[in-house]
Amino acid sequence: MSETNAVLIRGARIYGEGEPQDVLISDGEIREIGAGLTAPEGADVIDGGDQVLLPGFVDMHTHLREPGREDTETIETGSAAAALGGFTAVFAMANTSPVADSVVVTDHVWRRGQEVGLVDVHPVGAVTVGLEGKQLAEMATMAAGVGKVRMFSDDGHCVYDPLIMRRALEYSSALGVLIAQHAEEPRLTVGAVAHEGPTAARLGLGGWPRAAEESIVARDALLARDAGARVHICHASTAGTVELLKWARGQGISITAEVTPHHLLLDDSRLETYDGVNRVNPPLREASDVAALRQALADGVVDCVATDHAPHAEQDKCCEFSQARPGMLGLETSLAIIARTMVETGLLDWRGVAKVMSERPAEIVGLPDQGRPIAVGEPANLTLVDPDREWTVHGPDLASVANNTPYEAMTFGARVTTTLLRGRVTVRDGKVQA
Ligand SMILES: NC(=O)N[C@@H](CC(=O)O)C(=O)O
Ligand SMILES: [Zn+2]
Ligand SMILES: [Zn+2]
C-alpha cells in the first residue's frame, strides 16, 4: 500500500465530543484514530485545530441548473459550493432544461459530477415526462443507468393528480426507489407569491395558504399507506405539516421529510422590503412555523436538512417581487444556519447535526458509503467545522455563479474549513482544492 495518499488530521474533536484525536486516512478509508499518531512519510497533515469532525454532509435537494441555465450554476460551480459547504454527496433536481426525465440527462449529470470530482452529484429523475404531471417517466431505465437514479421528483411542480401519484408510488416501491414530493396543491396557489397571512395582506401580495402544502402531505401519506410505499416530503414549511407527519408516523406510514435552512431561520417579516431575494417556494412562513420546524427537526419528526439550493440570475431576482423567480442559494451557508438555529439554541448537539445533515439523508436515499460512523475501516467522507469562526456572507464571494443569497451581509459563528471525499481533500482552509 502506498503511503503517498495518506492524510493525517491532527487534533480534531470527533462529533465535537471528548478530547482531540488524530485521524489517519489512506486509500479512501479511515485507518487509525488515536492521540499522538505518527504521520506516515509524505502524508498530508491537516491541523484539526480542535475543530469538530463530522461525517460529510448529504444534500437530498439541490438545483445545479446544468443542463440549460449554466448562466446561473453549473455542475462544476455547484460542486465547488457543495464542497465548501461540507457536502460529499448532493442530489441534483430534475427541473433542468431539458428536464432530467430520461437516462441521457441523468447519466450526463452523474458523469459530469464524477469528472469534476469534488462531490458525488446524484441525479434525481423526473416522476413525469417534462414535469407535466400527465405521464410517468421511464423511472426503471433511469434507475438502471450509470447514474443509478434512486430518487425521483417533479420538484418545482407538485405531482398533483392523485392517480398519477398513486401509480408513481406503486411503481417506486417495486423499483426500490424514493419519490420526493413538492407538496403544493396548485389550485390553492394560483397567483401566490408569499405566505398567506397578515404580512402578505398588508403588502398586497398574493397568498399561499398553509393548506396548499398540508392537503398534499395528508393525501400523499394516505396514498403511500395504501401502496405500501415510502414517500418523502420536500421542504416542509408549516406547523401543520409537522402535525401531519406525527400522525402519519403513528399510523405506521413510511413518510420522511426535510426542512431547509431558510425555513429554520427566516420568516415572512423579511418581505417588508419587497426584495425578490426573499421569494421562495414554499414561501417563508410565520415565526410560529419556524419554531415548530426547529422543534420537529430536534425531535426527529422532520428527518433531515436539505438546502433546496436554487440559483437564479440577477435579472430574474432583482425585479418586482411578484415577478422574481422563487428560490435562494443555500449550499455554502447551510452549516452556519444550522449552527445558529439548532446548535446555538441548544436544540441539537454536533452529533445531532451529523444525524440531520449526513446520516439520515444518506439512509433515506440509500447511499451505502455516506453518513457512515467516524470509525476505523469506514469511508473517509468527512467535514471539519470550526464552531467559533465568525464570517460575513457576501454573494460574490460564494462559488455559485448566481448571487441570490438571502443572508447577504449577515454574520455567522460557524464555518466549514475542510472537506474530504473518499480521503481526498476537496476543501482546505475554506478553499477548493483543484
Ligand atoms: N424552491 C424554489 O423556490 N425554487 C426551486 C424549485 C422548488 O424547489 O420548488 C427552483 O428550481 O428554483
Ligand atoms: Zn420544491
Ligand atoms: Zn427545489
Image (cartoon, rainbow, N blue to C red):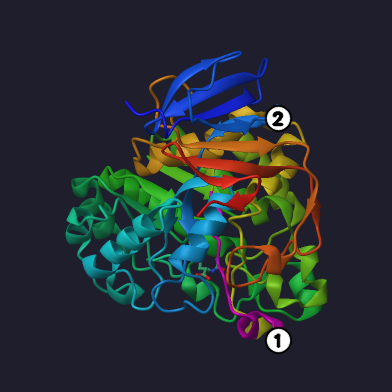
Residue 300 is at least partly visible in this image: no
The residue singled out by tag 1 in the image is 320
Task: Quickly name the residue at label 2.
Answer: 49
Residue at disc 1, secondary structure = loop
Residue 405 at x, y = what percent? 68, 66
Magenta span has 241? no
Q: Are marks 2 and 1 in contact (CB under 8 Å)?
A: no
Q: Which residue does the image show at 66% across and 55% down from the upper left?
A: 263
Name the residue: 18% across, 47% down: 174
The amino acid pointed to by label 2 is Gly
Indicate left or right for 42 with 334 as reference: left
Magenta span: 306-321
Q: Specify whether residue 376 is in view.
A: yes
The answer to which of 207 and 275 lies nearer the viewer is 275
In the rendered image of this protein, does residue 50 appear above or below residue 102?
A: above
Q: Position of residue 225 (x, y in %)?
A: 33, 44
Q: Residues within 10 Å of mark 1 (few under 14, many from 20)?
A: few
Question: Secondary structure beneath disc 2?
Answer: loop
Name the magenta segment's main secondary structure: loop
Relative to 29, is 425 on the left or the right? right
Residue 191, by quadrant, is bottom right
